[in-house]
Image (cartoon, grey):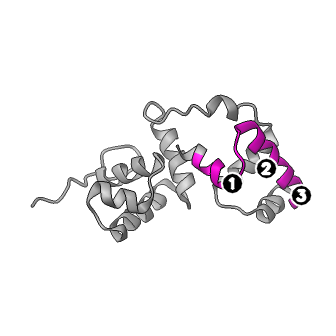
């Protein structure tokens, strides 16, 4: 059995397999689902994801999925894009920090505002995007 072609084939420096893993991740698949679809172990999926994170300069699945959309806008067009444009600049800043994995207190410190203000921005983001929780928000942005 021949090993899959892992040569680098795009400007990000990702191998073909890493691109496959990232595409599945950006489509909202879990590590288990990716493992199943690509017929590789969960451990191998996690190793590919670590490599993807390093090469893309990100630290989370959400940030990796977002970067994928930036690299391949034609393949990852999002129906949520018009709703994102309704967010204020501050709401976008809060959202960006959350996508990077920041907690409410960390976002508040980074923006120089109170944690309650961050929570208020989150409520406005939820309302504008039609979600009720951070999990729903992340699913919406990943899918």
Question: Is 22 left or right of 116, judged from the image as shown?
Answer: left
Residue 112 position, x and y percent, is 87, 57
Residue 85 position, x and y percent, is 71, 31
**How far apart are the two marked residues, 1 and 3, measured between alpha carbons?**
16 Å
Front tag of 1 and 3: 1
Seen as rendered, the residue at the extreme bottom is 43
Of mark 1 and mark 2, the one earlier in the sequence is 2
Residue tagged by mark 3?
116
Residue 77 position, x and y percent, is 51, 32
Quadrant location of residue 37?
Answer: bottom left
Task: Check disc 1 and report its element: helix, strand or loop.
Answer: helix
Of mark 1 and mark 3, the one earlier in the sequence is 3
The magenta stretch spans residue 31: no
- Callout 3 crowding tier (Cα within 10 Å): few <14, some 14–19, many ≥20: few
Observer-nearest of 135 and 95? 135
Residue drawn at (29%, 50%), measured in percent from left and top? 16
Residue drawn at (69%, 32%), measured in percent from left and top? 83
Residue drawn at (58%, 49%), measured in percent from left and top? 139
Residue tagged by mark 2?
122
Observer-nearest of 36 and 83? 36
- Residue 92 tag number: none
Residue 39 position, x and y percent, is 26, 60
- Callout 2 crowding tier (Cα within 10 Å): few <14, some 14–19, many ≥20: many
Question: Is 1 left or right of 85, judged from the image as shown?
Answer: left
Q: Are marks 1 and 2 in contact (CB under 8 Å)?
A: yes
Question: Is 62 left or right of 12, judged from the image as shown?
Answer: right
Residue tagged by mark 1?
134
Residue drawn at (70%, 52%), measured in percent from left and top? 133
Task: Check disc 2 and report its element: helix, strand or loop.
Answer: helix
Count of residue discs: 3
Residue numbers of the magenta segment: 114-139
**How far apart are the two marked residues, 3 and 2, measured between alpha carbons?**
10 Å
């Amino acid at each position: 059995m021949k090993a899959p072609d892992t040569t680098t084939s795009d400007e990000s420096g990702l191998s073909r397999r890493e691109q496959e893993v990232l595409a599945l991740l950006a489509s909202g698949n879990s590590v288990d689902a990716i493992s199943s679809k690509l017929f590789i172990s969960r451990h191998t999926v996690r190793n590919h994801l670590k490599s993807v994170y390093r090469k893309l300069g990100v630290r989370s699945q959400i940030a990796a999925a977002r970067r994928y959309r930036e690299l391949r806008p034609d393949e990852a067009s999002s129906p949520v894009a018009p709703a994102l444009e309704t967010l204020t600049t501050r709401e976008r800043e809060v959202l960006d920090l959350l996508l990077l994995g920041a907690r409410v207190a960390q976002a508040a410190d980074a923006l120089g505002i109170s944690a309650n203000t961050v929570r208020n921005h989150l409520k406005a983001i939820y309302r504008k995007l039609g979600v009720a929780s951070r999990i729903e928000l992340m699913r919406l942005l990943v899918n």
